[in-house]
Image (cartoon, helix red, strand yellow):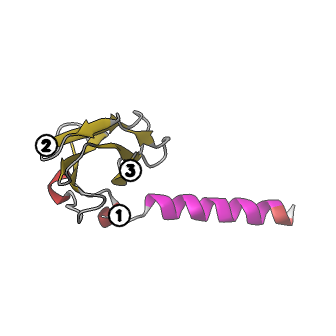
Amino acid sequence: MKNRAAALSVAAALVALGTALPASAAPAPAAAAAVESVRSGLDCTTWIHHNDPLYGGVDCTNNTGSPVTFHADIVCGWAPDVTGNSVTALPGRTEESSGHCAVYSSGIGHIGWTVE
């Protein structure tokens, strides 16, 4: 009985901690989308839609002399992560890969991209 009471006490403390996080722990808004350095010849900017915080993606410009295929990697909090559509950017062109987190997600926590 003692162990059960201790386990319930720990569980209650974890729930209280999870609901008492400061507002700064929330995902960054679209205005703070990261512009990351050139990786594999792509210059990419991540974004979160201003009307739908569960929809986000990445816009990448191909700075190489040949086509590059990539997709967005979206971390969706408490929901499964999402892989955006595969996109091929021709040299000098900018293309977009995006995805939508499940409705029960706690929000987009990070957006990255993978060159295929």
* Residue 42 tag number: none
- Magenta residues (range): 4-19
At 17% from the left edge and 54% from the top edge, which residue is drawn? 63
> What kind of residue is marked 1?
Ala
Q: Is residue 78 left or right of residue 10?
A: left
> What kind of residue is marked 2?
Arg
> What kind of residue is marked 3?
Thr
Q: Are marks 1 and 2 in contact (CB under 8 Å)?
A: no
- Marks 1 and 2, how far apart at CA: 35 Å
Q: Quadrant of residue 22?
A: bottom left
- Marks 1 and 3, how far apart at CA: 26 Å
Magenta region includes residue 14:
yes
Q: Is residue 26 left or right of residue 82?
A: left
Q: Quadrant of residue 31?
A: bottom left
- Residue indicated by mark 1: 25
For marks 1 and 3 on the same chain, the one whose residue lies earlier in the sequence? 1
Q: Nearer the viewer, residue 104 or 47?
A: 47
- Residue indicated by mark 3: 114
